[in-house]
Amino acid sequence: VQLQASGGGLVQAGGSLRLSCAASGTISGIKVMEWYRQAPGKERELVASSGGRTNYADAVRGRFTISRDNAKNTVYLQMNNLKPEDTAVYYCHVVSTTLPFYRWGQGTQVTVSS
């Protein structure tokens, strides 16, 4: 089962994008669905997490919203009021109780122009 991320693109500052990450099949025992991002020259960082609790990085709290459709094994990231510093490749990540325990999507590029 693979994760397919989509929805990235080029947007002006203040704009919005909605990322989606869908599994190609059923993943049993999902514990957490998350979004990470990696900007050029920087380490990958956690943006938002949806498990028993929903958590956000300080830099995106109030602007980004993570949601999930468990029936479709899909996680979304609604990004509003985008800023140039949000420019990065965004990756979805799923933690489950079935092998492989950790799955990464292929990444989708988000570019925010000033």
Image: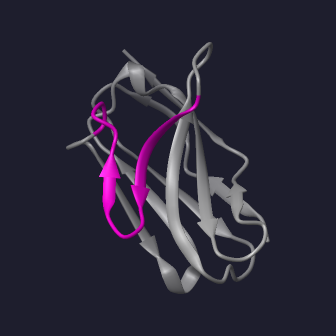
- Which corner quadrant holds the N terminus? bottom right
User: Is 105 or 111 nearer to us in this picture?
Assistant: 105
Q: Is residue 80 left or right of residue 18?
A: left
Measured as percent of width and height from the top left, residue 14 is found at: 27, 30
Residue occupying image coordinates x 69% and y 53%: 105
20 vs 13: above or below: below
* Point 30% across, 37% down: residue: 60
Side (left or right) of 22 relative to 46? right
Camera-nearest residue between 69 and 49: 49
The quarter holding residue 65 reads bottom left
**Looking at the picture, does residue 60 appear above or below residue 71?**
above
Answer above or below: position of 38 versus 41. Answer: below
Please state the extent of the stretch shown in magenta in the rendering.
44-60
Residue at image location 74% in from the left, 79% down from the top = 25
**Spot occupied by residue 55 in the image (x, y as percentages of width and height):** 32, 52
Was residue 48 drawn as part of the magenta stretch in this picture?
yes
Residue 26 location in percent, x, y?
70, 83
The residue furthest left is 62
